[in-house]
Image (cartoon, rainbow, N blue to C red):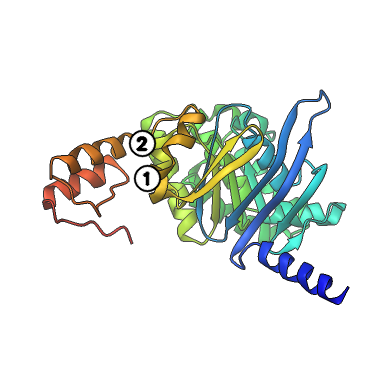
Amino acid sequence: AGTRLRTGKRCRERCRPPAATLLALDQIRFAYPDGSVGLDGCSLAIRRGSRNALLGANGSGKTTVFHHANGLLRPQSGQIRYAGQDVDYSRGGLRRLRSKVGMVFQNPDRQLFSASVLEDVSFGPFNLGLDEATVRQRVAAALLAVGMSGFADKAVHQLSFGQKKRVCIAGVLAMEPELLILDEPMAGLDYRMQEELLAVLDGLHARGITLLLATHDIDFAYRWADHIHLMRAGRCVASLDAPRLADYAGQLSALGLPLPAVIALQHGLMRRGLLALEQRPRSCAELLTMLEAGPSGKVDRQ
């Protein structure tokens, strides 16, 4: 019996996510009331301080993962851990979880419900029981972080779609989360607004906030993310370091996704001797820089 106990302990230690894991889903199963399967034995780990892209077709389970990560849904089997601790589904436990894991919905109109920007961004901190001075400080910092400081007194209905998305992010930031989840954040934004939002996300990551977003844009995911997670039929079928994406062409094809365009260009240039084997540009801008530097030129992504 002692041997079995020691063996079981070793197994649990081996299966435990790394110490740097902030959020871990372990064999999560969930079906909706109509019988449709949301997650079917889904396991996924998000490392603290990383940028993560979740890829998959509509209906693959991406949004269901997000709702479990934030405690909006509770798994019917399996386990979710945050910062190494099992999620506590009591009212107080969920309140603590949602103060650490913030979520921005795809449609900002689902998330904005106050008359003014100031009221909306203040709602979460006041709900935490913070005093007025602390709430004012947090709201000012959150609006500054998303470039909306001059819009505090603006009526929400007068904002553009992109501005509404940034106010949603500010409302979550005012809770001072450790993990920010964004469901299709670039959807509905033109090129300029996408670049503005990307600058906001990069600024948040520089402050140490862990980022997890869903996207259908494979080129964006490849150039932006540290880690990419592939979803299919309610499961995470692969988690990989973004630079290794070229090794997963088969899995991407099964998801209906192509390889990023820059990878095809890279392979073509390598065959012509214009790019060295070890050079792996992750964007067209990076590729152009390498070409200008010559076949031996290297770009530091640090």
List x then y, in percent, for residue 130: 74, 59
The image quarter containing residue 107 is top right
The quarter of the displayed image where residue 100 is located: bottom right
**Category of crowding for the residue at label 2, using alpha-carbon neighbours closer than 10 angstroms: few (below 14), some (14–19), many (at least 20):** many
Amino acid type indicated by mark 1 = Arg
**Residue 30 location, x and y as percent?**
77, 37
- At 76% from the left edge and 55% from the top edge, which residue is drawn? 128
Residue 243: where, in percent of width, then height? 38, 50
**79 or 146, nearer to the observer:** 79
Name the foreground residue: 115 vs 40: 40
Tell me residue 268's x, y (percent). Answer: 21, 37
State the residue lying farthest toward the bottom: 2
Question: How many numbered marks have been drawn onto this rendered protein structure?
Answer: 2
The residue tagged with tag 2: helix, strand or loop? Answer: loop
- Residue designated by label 1: 223
> Which quadrant of the structure image shows residue 133?
bottom right
223 and 147: which one is in front? 223
Identify the residue under disc 2.
Answer: 260
Left or right of 206 on screen, residue 167:
right
Is 255 above or below relative to 274?
A: above
Label located before the other in sequence (1 or 2): 1
Q: Is residue 153 visible?
A: no
Locate the N terminus and report the quarter of the image it occupies.
Answer: bottom right
Residue displayed at 12% across by 52% down: 293
Cα distance between the residues tagged 1 and 2: 9 Å
- The answer, for residue 247, to whether it is visible in the render is yes
Q: Are marks 1 and 2 in contact (CB under 8 Å)?
A: yes
Q: Nearer the viewer, mark 1 or mark 2?
A: 2
Residue kind at label 2, given as amino acid type: Pro
Report helix, strand or loop for mark 1. Answer: helix
